[in-house]
Structures are given as C-alpha cells and as structure tokens.
Image (cartoon, rainbow, N blue to C red):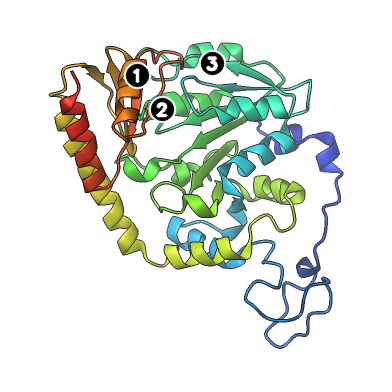
Amino acid sequence: MKNFDINNLVRDNVKVLKPYSSARDEFEDFDTANMVFLDANENPYQNGVNRYPDPQQASVKVVLAKNKGLSPKQILLGNGSDEVLDLLFRAFCEPKEDNVISLPPTYGMYGVLANINNVEHKEILLSESFQPRVEAILEAVTPNTKIIFLCSPNNPTGNSFTTESVTTILEKFNGFVVIDEAYIDFSEKASWLAKLDQYPNLIITQTLSKAYGLAGIRLGICYGSAEVIAVLNKIKPPYNVNELTQQRALERLKDQSKIDSEIASIIAQREALLQVLNEVSFVEKIYPTEANFILIKVDNANKRYDELIAKGIVIRNRTTQPLCENTLRLTIGTEEENMKLMEALKELK
C-alpha cells in the first residue's frame, strides 16, 4: 500500500454526488423529545412504527462503537451484509472498466454483485490448504483493480487466512481489501478491527446474522475509516435499516452475556460433532474449522446429501465449488439437532 488516497478510488460521479437529504437529517443536533413532526408526510397516530426510522441508526452505532472500541463515524449499517457489499461496488467500481478479485471457494455473492454492477470479477483459487496464493493474487492486480475480497474465516471452508498473507496483501495492494468476518465470533483469532487505523485501505464487514442469532432482521455492518464511511453514506438509501431492525438489534446487543453463552455452546457442539465425524465410515476428510459449521469430504456428496434429506436433515452440498468435490457443509445446531444429525450419520452405510 503506497501513497494510498481514497480519492483515487471513488467513482467520479460519486465524488460530485449531492446525497439525498431526508427530513430527519436536517435537525439531528436538536432535542427532538418535544418537537411536533410535520415534515415527512407520515401518519401522525402513534403505533411504534408510524415514523421513519433514524436514517443513521445512531443508537445502534453508539453501542457497536463502544463494544468494538471505534468511533460511530467508522460504522455503516446496511440491510444485511449484501447491501453493504453492494454499496462498496457502487461507490468504488466503475462499470465496464474496473475489476475486483475474490478467492474461491468462497461466499458466492461477491461474484453475483460484480455481475449486477457490471464489474469484472477475477477469481484466484485458494491453495489446496485453502489459503490465499498471495503471489498469484498480486500478479492479477491491474490499475483498474479496486477491491480484493477476503472471507476469513472463510465460507464454505471454515478456516481463517494467515496473518502473514493478509498483511502482505494489505501492504502491497493499493486498493481496498475487504475482510468479510461474518464468522469471526467463532474463531480464537482476533478480528482485524484493531488494524483499521494502521491500514487506510482496510474495510471489514460483519453481521448480526450468525453469532448474534439475528439473521431474520437483516443487519449488516461495515467498519472502515471515517473517509470510507462518509462516501458510503452519500449513496446509501436514506432509510435503509428499518425501525424494527434497529430496536431488535439494540435489545440483543445489550445482552452480551447471553450471546457469549450461545457462542460457547455452539463451539462445544462443534467439537462434539467433530468427534463423531471421525467415526463415520464414509467421511474421508474433516477440514479444520473456526466457524459455526464443518466442511467434510465424503465418498459421494450427492448420495449422502439425498440420504440425509430423506431423514429430514437439511445440510449444504458444496461439491460444485472449486476444490470442494464431494464435500458437505454441516451447520452446528442445538444439542438436540446435532444428536439427530449424529444418529443419522451413524445409520448410513
């Protein structure tokens, strides 16, 4: 990373864009407790959601900032991580000109969003041990490469990328490195959040869908420099996170002890399932995992997937993914759900 300047990465039309100013953006520094709201053409009769939500989700950001040791100005919230990722494409990638890089096997939405935004998507396969091939990645970089996506812990493989490989990419790539940490809460490795001030080209995405158990409310999180977040705020929809989502997120975030207990339980169940998988005859390999799932290689993934479906157990067949022939991905459930899975696996021949 040499002479990194965010202005060299922001699309020209975004630089000059005048963002939409919502009714609630215009008086954010005032005490609104006793104000009469006649500005936004809302239904005036109170029912809890008759008013538009806070467009900047200030209350949620304050809690997240305190928990992560950051400033609220370093946080953007989105309608799931997919909206956050889409905003990155729209802010920094010029259609038909720029390109991004991802490392299969990995989360499929990077490629989908590239296609939606008409941005070239380069794929550099991971190594056989599911680690970034740093030299190949850097060789694929062109002057029009804007983003490299690193999912760590990775989906569907479950492993984290080495600190050395990520550091090298951050230091030698003059674009944005987006580290997707959807599963970081299940790993013993530290988040890259502590490195935000060290690397201005570092962007981190997280979510409340996994460890926090809030997949149904769709709340994705982007952490970056204040400059990066300011650009994303220019282009995000004015009320992209609804009031019910904000309320439920606040409620959940205030009960960290319960979250920690659930994470510990999931990790314990993961270890128990790993022990059983060692005894299943058709399991040929169990891949190391730091997530809330386990990737296994079996004799015939299509056959085993169908057999488990017939027993009422839904898992994910990943055999079509690069480097993942005959693999199945097993999400860690409750103790009761895992017992059913273990029993089903033992019954299969």
- The amino acid type found where label 1 is placed reads Thr
Residue neighbourhood size for the residue with mark 2, other residues' Cα within 10 Å, grouped as few (<14), some (14–19), many (≥20): many
- The amino acid type found where label 2 is placed reads Pro
Name the disc covering residue 137, or none. Answer: 3
Which percent across, then down, holds residue 10?
Answer: 75, 36
- Sequence-wise, the earlier of marks 2 and 3 is 3
Q: Name the residue beneath numbered marker 1.
A: 327
How far apart are the alpha carbons under marks 2 and 3? 20 Å
Residue displayed at 64% across by 78% down:
47
Residue 44 falls in image quadrant: bottom right
Which percent across, then down, holds residue 189?
Answer: 33, 39
Name the disc covering residue 156, or none. Answer: 2
Is 120 left, or right, of 107 in this rendering? right
Name the disc covering residue 147, or none. Answer: none
- Callouts 1 and 2 close, C-beta under 8 Å: yes
Name the secondary structure under disc 1. strand
